[in-house]
Image: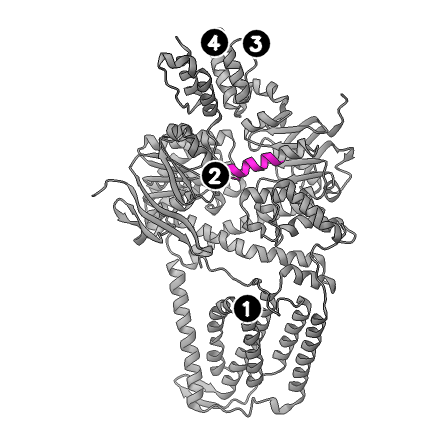
Amino acid sequence: MQGVAIPITMVAGNSWMHRINPLPKLLFALGILIFSFATRNPMLLGTVFAVGVFLALTSGIWAQYFKIVQIFFPISLTLITLQSIAPAFPLPWTAIATYGPFTIYQEGIYSGLSMLLRIYCMTTFALVVIMTSHPSDMFVSLQKIGMPYVLNFIFTMTLQLIPILQNEFSTVLSAQKSRGMKGSGFGALLPSMVPVFVGAIERVQQLSISLESRAFGSSGTKTSYRNVTFAFKDYLVGVVGVLITGGLTAWVLLDPSLDWSRTLQFAPEVALGIVLLSTVGFLAFFVVAIFYIVRA
Amino acid sequence: MERTPHIEISQLTFTYATAEKPALKNINLTIYEGEYVALLGLNGAGKTTLLLTLNGVIPHMVMGDMEGVVTIAGRDTDALPVRELAKVVGIVFDNPEFQLSQLTVAEEVAFGLENLGVPQAQMHDIIHEVLGVVGLTGLHERSPFALSGGQQQRLAIASALVMRPQIFVMDEPTSNVDPIGKEEIFQVARQLNQQHGMTVVISEHEVEVMAEYADRVIVLHEGEIVLNGHPREVFQQVKLLKEIGLRVPQVTEMAYMLDTQGLWHAGDAYPITVAEALHVFAKYRKEYRI
Amino acid sequence: MTSTALIRCEHLHHVYARGNVTALNNINLEIQPREIIGIIGQNGSGKTSLVKHFNGLLKPSSGRVLLDGQDTAKRRVQELSADVGYVFQNPNHQLFAKTVEEELEFGPRNLGLSQADIVERREKAIEFFGLQEYRTHHPYRISFPLRKLVGMASVYTMQPRVFILDEPTTGQDNITTRTVYRLIQRLRDEGKTVICVSHDMILLAEVAERMIVMRNAQIIADATPRSVFADSAIMQSTRITPPQVTEFGVQYMQQVTRPLTESGLKPTVVLSVQEAIDTLFAQDQK
């Protein structure tokens, strides 16, 4: 865990995505979210996912996006493995093959695939938005549409705290190792959380005094330092985004032929291949991750 | 010259909710406009407690029992909320990082302005001015957490300065900062006092620096004021300060030790700075060739 | 050439992956047993990065660090902790037990000592650091300076051969600072090697026998405190000021030097108030 930062933060850049106001982008991402839940059609989800990847590529955030994806996506492969043997899907289930106590079902693979793609879609668009928007601008935009000021503040503070607390934790681990602490198992990590929490509490206590001493919580209008403007292109993106995602959602809800849950059949070899690949992929990642954690 | 009282503390006693003994006992103190006051004392003597009463954090944000009256620029701290007193008293603490929360330096400074409802059009100039005072010009877009300790503390000072306080309180501002940072912070404190006319109250352990810059030194011990006067007066009391467990400037200690060995010219004040020491010893050399 | 050095750095180079920062640039250094060393320099000069290599918290990017002739790169921090103790600057990073006693027992327990030994060491530490009143206190319920002492005590109970103290007097008042002085003196009497990273020049002037000055990831001076404080070029380049009494001494000597050069008396750099008195007294005596 040492030194692994969670790099979910804005990536500096000047791509066309960067130059769009965060609000329409947030709206777009929300639309994608709704769409993703409205359908299980793997092809549609896959296409939208591909569009998301294209956006990531063209906004200059690919390196950072990939960094997150390479950790996150392999973990999600378990979904296919688990779903294939126990589909979260209404009966009846069509079996493809049986291996010992495990039976692989068509609906399982379908369900697993669509869940996976759903997650990939949402994550990709969310990351594209977060990585191309300055957090302060995002919060100011949300405030403009009525989000309470305090929430803004809580979000900002949390964003700051995550890397800080990670650092603290890492330092605490170093201090404990320097006193001969044996074992890097969870039992050893748990007591190390105490100093981090105490530190966080002390920090927040001090911070609240500092904030109050700068008139935090004053009633009356609060002004804003950051200037978030709306240009024509922002309205355009907003409108287009809503239309596209709205249209897609409407389409999948209204057109029953898009529901491939009963019609998509995987050949046994293909099905088995998919499951094996997912399982191997996930296990391989798991092994590598444990190796890194133990070595730290 | 008539001096205007800026801070008036009358019979102040404060006991923390979880404590048995009072942290401050019957404190009576007047600090005048434009003074640079150093507050000395061991950890636990009550320095932080006393400073927190100056902007109302005690009694409004800390649980405990407060008796007595604290008046800041004519305002009773018990009657006004902290956010109102914040317009008169700026305060920074010993951990620079714990005072920061925003994503960029400019936003950190702007925070107070936003809370006060200052129009956006005016913000830019004020921020620029204030960053200039503390020597952080050009660092607008930097993350506060990427700054050095000294820079962070100066940022904390700048963030409080936008409130345009008349009084600036600093609780051990340099204790977690490296030597260069310490110098920078002391310089800013001096500037605020000399160039901007602010009353500065600073608690510190760096006695050599305080001897040099302070107009007044107040020594706290176990919640009570034991010494209160010009640095030269206070630091003469070497024996008392040692008994309390405090240090005096090294040159002062040197003179004191010579005195105990019968090698000091009676009637001469102990020097408290290097310049004073050189002057006194030059005098000796000519007269006594000790 | 074999060296009997306790710690040896050979062409030690360290680069932090994040931001590609060179923290240590070709450091070559030998530390003998029983040395009391002060390491000074501004934040970012590399002092903390250097000492973290001694107990394995950092491993070299290139070059070697040897403890007793053995390469530390191959050894784990936990292993090295028996020989090299590291007292962190912020005690909060270490403390997590429910009582001060438990905290003091943590280190020796990890070393696998018998309960009797653990208790003996614990008591010795409590006595030395004056923690009797606070035995059963929760570490977070005592004042910060006391916590810092507990942090030092909890490494003291491990009785390593080398003690690394990271800014032991920062955030401390005079009384707890004096305990640090006594600690270093006690450690010296016990034959330990002490490496003290500090900004406290008054402390180092009194206790250090050797000063290493760092700047920009390199060692720019490695000599006695007297030589280092006397070297105004070094002091200015690293923007560190010597103790007040030393500055006074230097300026005073400059004032009196002219009449005294005939008597052949050489100006010396004084490191403490007592020394200033002895020197001045002797100097001025005809």
Question: Tag on residue C148?
Answer: 2
**Distance of mark 1 from mark 4, alpha carbons?**
78 Å
**Distance of mark 2 from mark 1, alpha carbons?**
47 Å
Say what amino acid the circle numbered 2 marks: Lys
Q: Which residues are magenta?
A: B172-188
- Residue B20 visible in the displayed image: no
Asked whether, in this view, residue C14 is left or right of residue B273, the answer is left
Marks 1/3 in contact by CB < 8 Å: the verdict is no
- Quarter of the image with the C terminus of chain B is top left
Question: Tag on residue B262?
Answer: 4
State which chain disc 1 sits on: A
Question: Which of the two marks, 2 or 3, is nearer to us in this view?
Answer: 3
State which chain disc 3 sits on: B
Residue A135 magenta: no
Give the residue at x 61% y 83%: A39
Disc 4 residue crowd, few under 14, some 14–19, many 20+, Cα 10 Å: few
Marks 2/1 in contact by CB < 8 Å: the verdict is no
Q: Earlier in the sequence, mark 4 or mark 3?
A: 4
Which structural element holds mark 3? loop
Disc 2 residue crowd, few under 14, some 14–19, many 20+, Cα 10 Å: many
B221 and C34: which is toward the camera: C34
